[in-house]
Image (cartoon, rainbow, N blue to C red):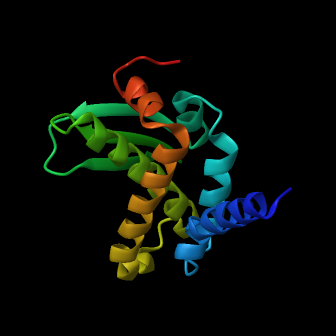
Amino acid sequence: MGWLELLAEFIKEKEEKENLLSQKFPQFSFSTSADRWIESNMNNTILEQLEDRKIKNVFFNRLKCKGILSNMKDNFFVQINENDTMEEKALTLGHEIAHIFEYEYNKGDDRWLKNLPIIETFCDEFAKKWITLNGKEKIESFLKGDIQ
């Protein structure tokens, strides 16, 4: 392997490490679980990924916000604003998946509310990474009802 290949491999490894949620959000122990989950599920269908996170259904409604995650006996339901673009819907779905990691860690403890702005940032970053690793087309196809 030549020095150019070694340099390219080093840069790739460095970028992957910098892209880890656990590196960006070390204050959240659940960020490591989120990193592992994304990496281990990227070959699964979106439906399989949702089932793995105990998301039982995704609904599209008129909302005053982007999305809502509801919990019933540790099963989750996601509502997404039907008026948003497909790209916004994909981001919202990823964002709401991220909230499940935080929920599992906190289990109803309201003290996490003091960290709400940074948790929202974590969820946004998770959503971007999730979309990048899965591919926008794969997620949008699912959202259009093309379940594979």
Q: Quadrant of the N terminus?
A: bottom right
- Asked whether the viewer can see residue 73, the reply is no
Q: Nearer the viewer, residue 33 or 76?
A: 33
Which corner quadrant of the image does residue 57 belong to? Answer: top left
Q: Give the total number of marks visible in the rendering.
A: 0
Of all residues, the one furthest to the right in this rendering is 1
The residue at 37%/49% (across/down) is: 69
Q: Is residue 8 placed above or below 84 in the rendered structure?
A: below
| Residue in view at x 39 percent, y 79 percent | 115
Identified at 43% across, 47% down, the residue is 94
Percent across and percent down for residue 37 are: 64, 51
- Percent position (x, y) of residue 82? 20, 34
Can residue 21 be seen by looking at this rendering? yes
Q: Where is residue 60 shown, x and y percent of the image?
A: 26, 32
Q: Is residue 117 left or right of residue 104?
A: left
Identify the residue at image location x=66%, y=60%.
Answer: 12
45 shown above or below 7: above
Q: Is residue 129 above or below residue 53?
A: below
On screen, residue 84 versus residue 129, left or right, reads left
Image check: 117 left or right of 75? Answer: left
Q: Considering only vertical position in the picture, is 60 above or below 8?
A: above
* 115 lies left or right of 105: left
